[in-house]
Image: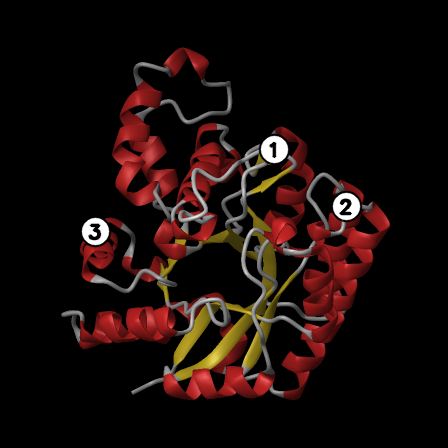
Amino acid sequence: MVGKIDVHTHAIPEFFHELLLRLGREASGVPTVQWSMEETNQTMSKLDISTSILSLSAPGPGIVPETEGARALARKYNEWASEVSTVEPSRFGFFAALPGLHDTEGCIAEIRYAFDNLHADGVCLFTSYRGKYLGDSSFEPIWKELNDRGAVVFIHPTMAEGSTLVSTMLQPPAFDFAHETGRTAAHMIVTGMKHRFPKSKVILSHAGGTLPILSERLAQLEANLFLNTLEAESPKSSTEILQDAKSFYFDLALAGTANVLDLLLKWAPREHILYGSDHPYATVEAEYNTRKLEEYDMTLERRMECYAGNGLKLFPRLSR
């Protein structure tokens, strides 16, 4: 059986780990975990992963508030990840890190450098930046650059600006992250951003968060009750809204259980479903969800598409 292509796996090089420890958990919203290449290789073997596309987890370079500092951190990570990928190109790839999207000039410069000089497999964006979600008009120059390149764009959730804990027993990754993914996808849809830049292949983390289960609700209410709130470039019918919702790709990180797969496999285009582990933030959870995915009843053809076939279409270099 062919090995899996993991589009949702994080690297935490030493310089980023030290930064996380110094700034503390409040800066990232998630616990600081240990990471090593040795452990990554062990996990890949255990979960039958042939290729891992590495990315920085939330909040990425934006953890440094200063513009030049965020730019420097993105560049440092991208050059490090490129070296890893160059040494073992069939085993590792990477999604380039970008400074905050409010830094249009810095983002476009880093996109060009990452693709043209470092041969990145795509870029990693987060669900919001300083309270603005990914359909915001100020981000349009960045989406245009990505669209012109036909780039793969991996969207990872992060904490909403100004969010507060309901309880210390309910941490953001456990529940809120899925909603943030659904919210930014919905924002891209209703603003028309997703439709205007169709060449970018956009991956939503964690089976799209709340988008699949709420897509019909979104489509019906926006196309009827809230039609007068839409703008000139917004989709106007429920059919158009649903088409845009299904144009995303969906990874299966922390989403390999039957309650998720029963919906996603029927709702999403079959070529848009990808494997993800969420290593190293998910360890026993990654093993559990992968086991449940492997036990789930589906045809061998469909399984091979989810594991690697769809990933090979997104990353054709892995077929060479």
Q: Quadrant of residue 313?
A: bottom left
In front of the other: label 3 or label 2?
A: 2
Identified at 69% across, 63% down, the residue is: 21
Q: Position of residue 99 (x, y in %)?
A: 73, 51
Which image quarter holds the N terminus?
bottom left
Residue most toward the right?
68
Q: CA separation, marks 3 and 1?
A: 30 Å
Q: Residue furthest top?
A: 228
The part of the image, by quadrant, that contains residue 132 is top right
Q: Is residue 57 left or right of residue 250?
A: right
Q: Earlier in the sequence, mark 2 or mark 1?
A: 2
In this rendering, the answer to whether 272 lies above or below 221 is below
Nearest the camera: 167 or 224?
A: 167
Label 3 SS: helix
Q: Position of residue 273 (x, y in %)?
A: 34, 61
Q: Secondary structure at mark 2?
A: loop
Residue 272 position within the rendered picture, expressed as x and y whole percent measured from the top left: 36, 58
- Nearer-N-terminus badge (3/2): 2
What residue appears at the point 79 percent right and 48 percent down from the top-left corner?
A: 106
The amino acid marked with disc number 2 is Pro
Mark 3 and mark 1 lie on one chain; the one further toward the N terminus is 1
Q: Residue at x 59, y 31 (%)?
A: 136
Read off the residue under disc 3.
263
Q: Is residue 92 left or right of residue 6?
A: right
For the residues marked 3 and 2, what is the alpha-carbon distance in whole angstroms?
Answer: 39 Å
Q: CA distance from mark 2 to mark 1?
A: 14 Å
Q: Which mark is residue 131?
A: 1
**Residue 305 can be seen in this image:** no
**Residue type highlighted by circle 3:** Leu
Q: Residue at x 34, y 75 (%)?
A: 287
